[in-house]
C-alpha cells in the first residue's frame, strides 16, 4: 500500500553506510529534480510524507546529517482517491491546482 522511500528519494548509499553514515544516493531522484510526477502521492508512510512536505514547502531535503536545497520547480501528484485523514491534509494543501478526472463511460470509449 505504501510507496517506499527508495522510489522517491533514492536507495541507501552503501559507501556511506560503510563510513557509519545513513544517507541516500539521491542523484536522479526527487531531491535533485526540477520537475517531478508522483503517482499515488497520498499512499505513503509518515517518513515519506514528512520529507515530501519539506521538499514541497521549503525546497529542502535532509539526507543524513546534510540538508540540501532541492531545485524543484514543478511537482504533479496523481491519485485514484482523495486523501482521507488529517495527516494528509497538509500535503493535499501543497497542491494548489486540483483537477478531478472522472472515468470514461463505455459509450465514450467507442
Image: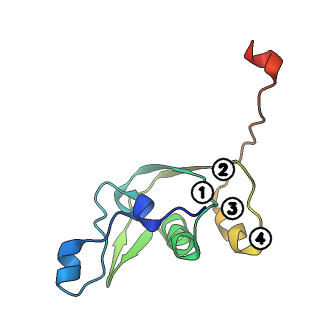
In this rendering, which labeled residue sits more in front, label 3 or label 2? 2
Mark 4 and mark 2 lie on one chain; the one further toward the N terminus is 2
The residue that label 1 is drawn on is: 41
In this rendering, which labeled residue sits more in front, label 4 or label 3? 4
| Residue 51 position within the rendered picture, expressed as x and y whole percent measured from the top left | 49, 72
Q: Nearer the viewer, residue 101 or 5?
A: 5
Q: Are marks 2 and 1 in contact (CB under 8 Å)?
A: yes
The residue that label 2 is drawn on is: 79
Label 1: state its secondary structure.
loop
Total numbered circles: 4
Label 4: state its secondary structure.
loop
Structural distance between the alpha carbons of marks 4 and 2: 15 Å
**Relative to 106, 87 lies left or right:** left
- Binning the other alpha carbons within 10 Å of mark 3 as few (below 14), some (14 to 19) or many (20 upward) gives some
Question: Residue at coordinates 80% horizontally, 21% vertically from top-left?
Answer: 106
Question: Quadrant of the image for the N terminus?
Answer: bottom right
35 is higher (above) or lower (below) than 32: above
Amino acid at each position: 500500500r505504501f510507496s517506499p522511500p527508495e522510489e522517491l528519494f533514492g536507495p541507501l548509499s552503501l559507501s556511506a553506510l560503510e563510513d557509519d553514515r545513513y544517507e541516500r544516493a539521491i542523484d536522479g531522484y526527487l531531491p535533485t529534480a526540477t520537475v517531478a510526477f508522483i503517482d499515488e502521492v497520498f499512499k505513503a508512510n509518515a517518513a515519506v510524507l514528512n520529507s515530501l512536505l519539506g521538499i514541497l514547502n521549503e525546497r529542502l531535503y535532509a539526507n543524513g546529517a546534510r540538508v540540501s536545497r532541492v531545485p524543484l520547480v514543478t511537482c504533479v501528484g496523481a491519485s485514484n482517491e482523495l486523501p482521507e485523514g488529517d495527516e494528509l491534509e497538509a500535503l493535499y494543501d501543497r497542491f494548489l491546482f486540483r483537477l478531478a478526472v472522472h472515468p470514461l463511460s463505455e459509450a465514450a470509449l467507442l
